């Protein structure tokens, strides 16, 4: 797999968060594409800037993906009431045998169901994706909302702002704070540490 560069902002919600219902309904209205369920196994790295996972989608050979943060761009307010941590990432991957790939290290198994909407902007060549994903880990249910732009040159914040506005502004009365904003590597480490 060729490396993929992206700029992302992501938030995590516990299963009983009242915003879960609002986001779920909004993604149905937007007619987002709903992916088949899949299992992702994350290796604990002890770092928030490096993610290692094995994606095991039904009917496909498993893929080992590494995701390295290449820049921490800090907290940004995308629209009123929506502030998160913007990060630049590089993703690389290769097909693997699941048993071999997960033989060593500590792994956290997650089951995911993602709704995704790709937003092309008519006035330029920008493309950005927004996603709403249910993440089941052990007996807990979590949700994540993320905005991601790939191969962005110039003004990534503006791309993410426009995508965020397309989903939230004037449609959802929600506030998203920087405290719940992080990439998957940071969330996996926080979750595993809290579980002991």
Image (cartoon, rainbow, N blue to C red):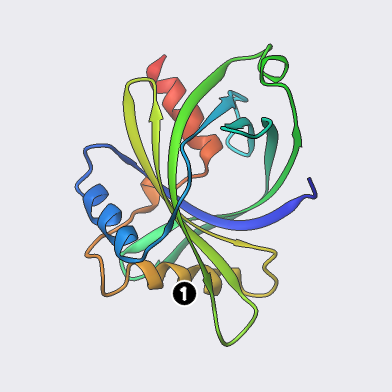
21 lies above or below 79: above
In this rendering, would 170 be left or right of 127?
left
136 lies above or below 127: above
In this rendering, would 24 be left or right of 109?
left
Q: At 71% across and 20% down in the image, what residue appears?
A: 101
> Split into 4 quadrants, where in the image is the C terminus?
top left
Q: What element carries label 1?
A: helix
Q: Residue 174: where, in percent of width, then height?
A: 25, 60
156 lies above or below 38: below
Q: At 26% across and 70% down in the image, what residue appears?
A: 171
Mark 1: few/some/many CA within 10 Å (<14, 14-19, 20+): some
Q: Residue 129: where, in percent of width, then height?
A: 52, 62
Q: Residue 12: where, in percent of width, then height?
A: 38, 43
Q: Quadrant of residue 47?
A: top right
Q: Residue 111: where, in percent of width, then height?
A: 45, 30
Which residue reaches farthest right? 2
Q: Which of 38 and 12 is in front in this view?
A: 38
Q: At 33% across and 67% down in the image, what residue appears?
A: 168
> Split into 4 quadrants, where in the image is the N terminus?
top right
In this rendering, would 11 be left or right of 176?
right
53 lies above or below 92: above
Q: Name the residue under label 1.
A: 162
Q: At 42% across and 67% down in the image, what residue appears?
A: 164
Q: Quadrant of residue 127?
A: bottom right
Which residue reaches farthest bottom? 123
């Amino acid at each position: 797999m060729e490396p993929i560069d992206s700029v992302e902002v992501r938030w995590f919600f516990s299963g009983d968060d009242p915003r879960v219902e609002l986001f779920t309904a909004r993604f149905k209205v937007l007619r987002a594409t709903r992916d088949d369920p899949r299992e992702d196994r994350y290796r604990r790295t002890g770092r928030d800037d490096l993610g290692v996972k094995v994606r095991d989608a039904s009917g496909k050979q498993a893929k080992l993906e590494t995701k390295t943060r290449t820049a921490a761009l800090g907290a940004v307010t995308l629209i009123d009431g929506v502030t998160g941590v913007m990060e630049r990432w590089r993703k690389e991957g290769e097909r693997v045998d699941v048993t071999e790939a997960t033989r060593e290290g500590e792994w956290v198994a997650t089951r995911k169901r993602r709704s995704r909407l790709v937003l092309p902007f008519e006035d330029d060549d920008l493309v950005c994706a927004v996603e709403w994903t249910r993440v089941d880990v052990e007996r807990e249910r979590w949700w994540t909302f993320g905005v991601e732009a790939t191969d962005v040159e110039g003004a990534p914040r503006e791309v993410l702002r426009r995508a965020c506005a397309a989903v939230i502004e004037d449609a959802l009365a929600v506030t998203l704070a920087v405290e719940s904003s992080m990439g998957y590597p940071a969330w996996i480490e926080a979750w595993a540490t809290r579980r002991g």
